[in-house]
């Protein structure tokens, strides 16, 4: 199958994801609550006055390591909130793709059953993520290249980690190994799906920025409205993108691991989602 055919089939798969999300709009609850929790905590800590930037700067000057530790704890907390709601989304989505009744509470409950694995995964992912970001922001070309390569490799290796942990009840290291095997057979489909989706999202945001640029900039109110519309559009795109990620993850996981056709998806499209291993024939 050439790249053009992969893109066509991925577009068709994406359309089916749209239809599934249209019939299951309540799944947007998970990414919405995840974003709200993260923004609310940031507001409470900073805008709410608990942590003032000048106080933070003074604290870092006098207690560097304590400040770094506090930053890591906050980063860890934000990450765990996102991981937990992503796991809830995938758990709920998988149940519905199997034709089962699953409420928002069911998704939260299923993820809660694996809280320890999710906690371990958050610690591992947060630690490695900090190392990668430090390399990417080192202002050293070699270190930035190494950071970029590590970042791509880590993303590929961990794409299916959360569904494997939640649905197979395994730890993060076992989930990485299993998830990498799944991704290795379906990388073209996964990458092409998100290439299409992110191109569409980028085009939409570009249009909004273009419209904002064309609006007369002579009044403060117009500038504020334009900025609000752009920011709102980015948040909406992030919310829908997170929901799509859960749907794609769950559908491909069920197709490959469970060998079952997700409810509402075309079996012909899913059959080509993963490359099949060639078997050597005896002559």
Image: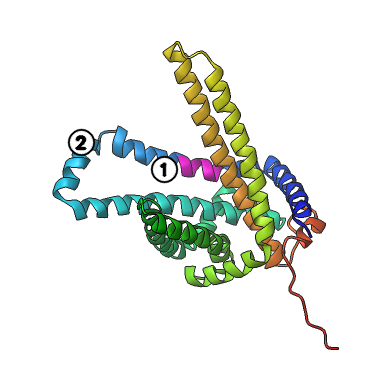
Q: Position of residue 79 (x, y in %)?
A: 42, 52
Query: Is residue 251 positioned above or below 205 on the image?
Result: below
Q: What stretch is highlighted in magenta?
A: 29-35
Quickly name the residue at label 1: 38
Query: Is residue 30 positioned above or below 186 on the image?
Result: above
Q: Where is residue 237 in the image (x, y as percent from the top left)?
A: 57, 38
The single residue placed furthest to the top in the displayed view is 218
Query: Is residue 10 positioned above or below 173 on the image?
Result: above
Q: Position of residue 23 (x, y in %)?
A: 70, 42
Asked if the residue at tag 2 contacts the one at tag 1, i.e. Cβ–Cβ closer than 8 Å, the answer is no
- Tag 2 or tag 1, which sits nearer the N-term? 1
The dot on residue 174 is none
Q: Is residue 30 magenta?
A: yes
Q: What element carries label 1?
A: helix
The single residue placed furthest to the front in the displayed view is 141
- Nearer-the-camera pick, 148 or 249: 148
């Amino acid at each position: 199958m050439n790249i053009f055919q992969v893109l066509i089939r991925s577009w068709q798969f994406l359309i089916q994801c749209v239809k599934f999300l249209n019939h299951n709009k309540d799944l947007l609850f998970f990414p919405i609550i995840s974003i709200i929790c993260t923004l609310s905590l940031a507001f409470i800590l900073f805008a709410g006055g608990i942590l003032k930037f000048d106080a933070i700067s003074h604290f870092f000057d006098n207690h560097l390591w304590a400040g770094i530790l506090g930053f890591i704890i906050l980063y860890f907390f934000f990450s765990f909130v996102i991981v937990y709601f992503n796991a809830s989304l995938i758990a709920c989505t998988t149940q519905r793709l199997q034709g089962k009744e699953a409420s928002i509470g069911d998704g939260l409950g299923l993820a809660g059953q694996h809280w320890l694995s999710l906690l371990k995964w958050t610690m591992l992912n947060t630690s490695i993520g900090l190392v990668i970001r430090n390399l990417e922001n080192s202002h050293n070309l070699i270190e930035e290249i190494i950071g970029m390569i590590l970042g791509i490799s880590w993303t590929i290796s961990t794409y299916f980690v959360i569904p494997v942990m939640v649905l197979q009840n395994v730890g993060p290291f076992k989930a990485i190994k299993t998830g990498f095997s799944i991704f290795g057979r379906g990388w073209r489909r996964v990458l092409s799906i998100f290439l299409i989706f992110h191109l569409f999202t980028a085009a939409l945001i570009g249009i909004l920025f273009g419209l904002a640029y064309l609006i007369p900039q002579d009044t403060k109110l117009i500038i504020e409205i334009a900025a609000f519309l752009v920011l709102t559009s980015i948040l909406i795109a992030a919310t829908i993108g997170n929901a799509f990620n859960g749907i794609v993850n769950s559908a491909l996981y069920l197709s490959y691991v469970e060998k079952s056709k997700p409810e509402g998806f075309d079996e012909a499209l899913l059959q080509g989602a993963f490359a099949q291993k060639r078997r050597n024939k005896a002559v």
